[in-house]
Image (tube, grey):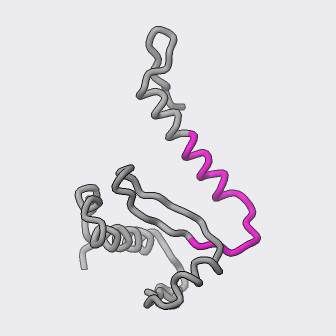
Amino acid sequence: MHDISKRNGRTTFHGRLLAARIYELSAMQRLLMANHPDKKCVVIMWSEEKQALVSYTLEVERVLAVTQRQFPLELPAADYNNAFDDEFARRFGGATLNLLALSNPGLKPFVKFTPAEE
């Protein structure tokens, strides 16, 4: 259980911020647990203004319409023993953050993880 900071019976700024983060997390959990009959894509971007990673879910058709002339980076499941495991997720997340940081230099100071040993 998270302690929401209170002072003189009022929730402090830190407490409100923590409550907002908890609400965001529970909203994300509800989104992940919901039944989604339509196929979706996830688009992740860096917002310099908000200093935050921003994620959107979009219909596949909308993403394909925008990306049809782009060169895709495909990662076939067969190349990873038909399993996207913890190590794959760690490397994929790291690679994604590094790719975002290439065109968003403001993100680079936030990217701090240890590269995998080869």
Instruction: Find residue 112 and report its horizontal and vertical position in percent.
Output: 26, 59
Place residue 64 in its image quadrant: bottom right
Please state if 15 lies on the left or on the right of 37 as rendered: left
Task: Please tell me how many numbered marks the rendered image carries.
Answer: 0
Taking the magenta stretch, the answer to whether it contains residue 32 is yes
Q: Which residues are magenta?
A: 23-41
Q: Quadrant of the N terminus?
A: top right
Please state if 95 lies on the left or on the right of 67 as rendered: left
Q: Between 19 and 106, which is closer to the camera in this rendering?
A: 106
Q: Between 106 and 78, which is closer to the camera in this rendering?
A: 106
Looking at the image, which residue is at 35% across and 67% down?
A: 97
User: In the figure, 60 relative to 97: above or below?
Assistant: below
Please state if 64 lies on the left or on the right of 12 as rendered: right
User: In the figure, 23 relative to 106: above or below?
Assistant: above
Looking at the image, which residue is at 25% across and 70% down?
A: 115
Instruction: Find residue 48 and report its horizontal and vertical position in percent.
Output: 34, 56
